[in-house]
Amino acid sequence: MTQLKSSPSLLVSLLIGLLVVIAAQPALAQETTRQEFDDTIHVIQRKPVLQKGRFDLVPRFGVSVNDSLYRHYKVGVNGNYHFSESVYLGGLFEWYNFGDALGGPTDAFNETANETRTNADVAVLNWVGGLELGYKPIVGKFALADSFIIFYDVGLTAGGVGIDAESLALSSGDVTFGGTVSAVSRIFLNDWMAVNLEVRDVIYSADLRGAPGSLTNIVTVAGGLSLYLPTTFEYSDQVAE
């Protein structure tokens, strides 16, 4: 029977190889752990503009869109105080009466009057002012030309207003009360300025010729600027609510 003898050099080579494999295991495990950890990192970007505790003043210009017989134009201003990042209280005033210079009966109104040989009556707003409560449920961002990140929010408001209104047939103005709802979006340009876009509905009881107490609504689309005071803000360690 022949006995196999291992040479010392072969044993040394096997031992060195085994040590290399054992030494490589922790490094491999560490690299795998690092890779798995890197794959789970999510960067949360903080809000670019904080509104809590700030006041924004909003001059705007708008036009009515739901009445084919009479076109309203308006200039107005809103002042809003933001109790939090989501809730704010605002005051508004809008002026609609520009005489014959801007707005008035449309071509459709004149055509209807000529065809029917009657003078139709429509509701006319002079001014609107009141208070409203706002809530902003949506905050988002989008890329502009792959170079800029634009941040925006979308809010809803509801409130009560005083209204000076008349009609084409009944020209004496009468102050009454009504309600208003709106959807508004702010597109932020910097820390203290945003483009402001609004759709507003003013609802009230109008006295028309032959139809006193008619439920009427005027829907307007408007654009303006939100100007924030103070113009700067500071981030805190807590997440802004």
Image (cartoon, rainbow, N blue to C red):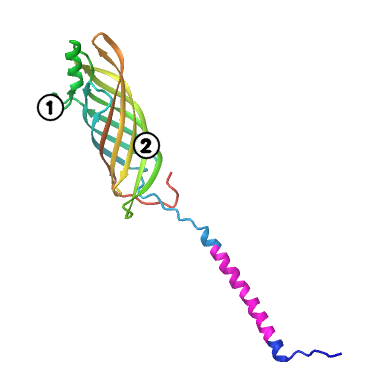
Q: Which residue is mark 1?
A: 101
Quadrant of the rendered structure where residue 18 is?
Answer: bottom right
Residue at the extreme front of the image, as rendered: 1
Which is nearer the N-term, disc 2 or disc 1?
Answer: 1
* Closest to the observer, 72 or 51: 72
Q: Amino acid at mark 1?
A: Ala
Determine the CA span between mark 2 and mark 1.
33 Å
Q: Amino acid at mark 2?
A: Gly
Which residue is drawn at the image coordinates 26% and 22% (left, top)?
163
Image quarter hosting the C terminus: top left
Q: Of discs 2 and 1, which sits in the foreground?
A: 1
User: Residue 148 location, x and y as percent?
Assistant: 32, 53
Residue 191 belongs to the span the image colors magenta:
no
Q: Is residue 89 visible?
A: yes
Residue 13 appears left or right of 68: right
Q: Is residue 108 above or below residue 236?
A: above
Residue 40 appears left or right of 202: right
Q: Which residue is mark 2?
A: 155
User: Residue 113 location, x and y as percent?
Assistant: 18, 14
- Which range is magenta? 13-35
Image quarter hosting the N terminus: bottom right
Q: How dense is the environment of label 2, judged by Cα within 10 Å: few (below 14), some, or many (20 and up)?
A: some
